[in-house]
Amino acid sequence: MDAARLRFLYQTEQGRIDRATWRRGAGALLAALAPLTLIWFALAPYSAHDLATTPFFAPMTILAYAYVIFYAFAVMLCVVSFINLSAKRFRDRGLEPPLGLASIAPLLALIAGAAHFVQPYVAEVMSRWYVWGVDALFVAAALWTIYELGWREESRTHRASPPP
């Protein structure tokens, strides 16, 4: 894919795309993010640093925190790219507001990720039920987005140009 096509798909929310293009674009973002997430899962146990049991300068803890900074940047970049990609598809489907609808699933994904990260540290005030509730909301929004943008049949009525 050339640079102009990548810029159109991921760096702007203007324009329209079909469902096959959305599926390819969303799949590419998922393929980029999946290995980074697996690396974070491997390093996450090292982010719990207890000075009573481990030395002050623990190399794996430093690596885990350095990686999480990189990982957070990569996640935010993928989220913005996914929102731009999805806004084009929502616009093509005739659903308004396209940017708002495209933001629902990524917002819930970020909230779910934050809940999973924070809950062990504040377990006395945030139960696992809260985390599972946010997960359920995210899964529902993600399934709706995938169905609406990637598999729902095209309706031709929304393609008419608006009156001048």
Image (cartoon, rainbow, N blue to C red):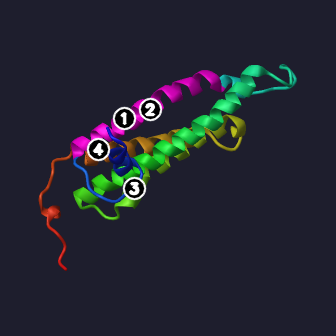
Query: Disc 2 marks which residue?
Result: 32
Return the disc, 4 or 2, that comes first in the chain's sequence. Answer: 4
Residue 12 — which label?
3
Picture quadrant where residue 62 is located: top right
The answer to whether the residue labelled 1 contacts the one labelled 2, judged by CB atoms less than 8 Å apart, is: yes
Return the disc, 3 or 2, that comes first in the chain's sequence. Answer: 3
How many numbered marks does the figure carry? 4
Main SS type for the magenta part? helix
Where is residue 83 shown, x and y percent of the image? 41, 51
Dot 2: what SS? helix
Nearest to viewer (mark 3 / mark 2): 3
Query: Disc 1 marks which residue?
Result: 28
Where is residue 114 shown, x and y percent of the image? 59, 42
Report the span colored magenta. 19-44
Picture quadrant where residue 94 is located: bottom left
Residue 108 seen anywhere in this rendered image of the structure = yes
